[in-house]
Image (cartoon, rainbow, N blue to C red):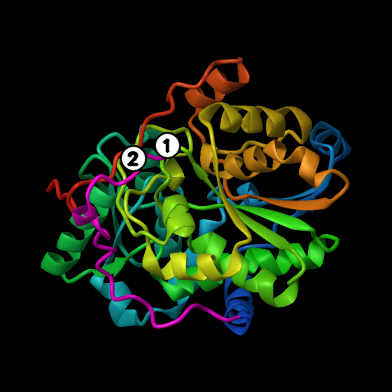
Amino acid sequence: MLNSPTTPGAAAATLARHTEPAHPVSVDDVRRAHTVIMEHVSPTPTLSHPLLNDALGFESFIKLENAHTVGSCKIRGALNLLAAMSEDERARGLVTATSGNHGHAMARAAQIFGAQLTAFVPKNNSRERNRVMAGLGAEVVEAGHDFDAAMRAAERYAKSHGARLVHPALEPELMAGVATLALEMIEQSEPLDALFLPVGGGLAAAGTAIVFKTLSPQTRLYGVQSENAPAMHHAWHTGERRAFAVAGTVADGLALRTPVEYTLGVLENTLDGMMLVSEAAVYDAIRTYATTIHQIADGAAAVALAAAAGMREELAGQRVGLVLTGGNIEAETLQHILGGGTPRHHPQAMPYYPITELSYGY
């Protein structure tokens, strides 16, 4: 359970320093993005399988975004963003912060468009993910103890080096690109009663929600976060914009400290619910994907299935969509989970930060 604020002085945390985009994307933006990115990627399948349906008690439709060559949906947005940039922007070099999937996608897109990427990652970031980014040509720099601290370091780098700063949740072209998965999902599946979406910075969820609310308004939309990284969940439910300490979570791709106003504004107007799931539930979801449809999900992707499985009685007999956003899980972690291992991170009280932001340098 979330702790109540102890002082009103802890008020709204400073949000990301990018200039906030003026408005969210439209379905027409998403359609244009789909045309652009199809020069480089293929549509991913949406799968319904009797073994998974039997395990869940409802008919599920899984959008397999782990099928991309970089293993996640983020490549859609990265390609659309790089295609929209001027030659001058690309020549200046790009800088971003990431814990993995966003960095993989940006590195690959930069490689395709002939740009140099510098990716700031938390100091405890997965060595496997860092190696992938470096292998795709990115310069990987460790900075700070979490994503937010790495993002601050990226901002300082952009200012001092003149590089083009890319925030994973504050780029309309990223949102429009990632939201192309929703266009495909609507075409590939029967009309859905409900759809579950992982939420970190909220960009993929927001873009997908815009498409579904426009083209499939009958579909109920649910956002999902890890209980150990609940900043967006808390903001959605209470209206408060507060920073939270981020505890360890297998869904580390969703772990941010500070709510993102741009995407949160979209989610507040489109989602029918926002949920938290436990580490144990995410472990179960990873095992379920592997043992039924033989698909690998990383922790961030598995939260959607974890939440839907927790609502199986309410969803009985319905058609339910699940976006398997990525499959970039470390080999040792996957072996631990599939071998019946118990969660390595435990539920923790989530204190509010008493100050608006922390900066750790690099």
Residue 228: which numbered mark, if any? 1
Q: Is residue 298 left or right of residue 119?
A: right
* Up-down relation of residue 324 to residue 288 (above or below): below
Report which quarter residue 179 is drawn in. bottom right
Looking at this view, is 324 or 36 the one in front? 324
* Up-down relation of residue 292 to residue 25 (above or below): above
Looking at this view, is 66 or 5 the one in front? 5
Looking at this view, is 31 or 191 the one in front? 191
The residue at the point 67 percent across, 65 percent down is 182
Circles 2 and 1, Cβ within 8 Å, touching? The answer is yes
Image x and y of residue 251, in percent? 48, 38
Image x and y of residue 152, in percent? 21, 56
Image x and y of residue 339, in percent? 60, 15
Q: Is residue 27 left or right of residue 58?
A: left
> Label 2 amino acid?
Val
Q: Is residue 222 left or right of residue 318?
A: left
The boundaries of the magenta stretch are 1-26
Q: Secondary structure under badge 2?
A: loop
Let me know if residue 37 is in the magenta part.
no
Cα–Cα span, label 2 and label 1: 6 Å
The residue at the point 42 percent across, 36 percent down is 228
Q: Secondary structure under badge 1?
A: loop
Q: Is residue 157 left or right of residue 224?
A: left
Image x and y of residue 252, in percent? 43, 40
Q: Is residue 233 visible?
A: yes
Which callout, 2 or 1, points at the residue further toward the start of the chain? 1
Q: Main secondary structure of the magenta part?
A: loop
Q: Which residue is mark 2?
A: 246
Q: Indicate the quadrant containing the N terminus: top left, top right, bottom left or bottom right.
A: top left
Q: Is residue 179 visible?
A: no
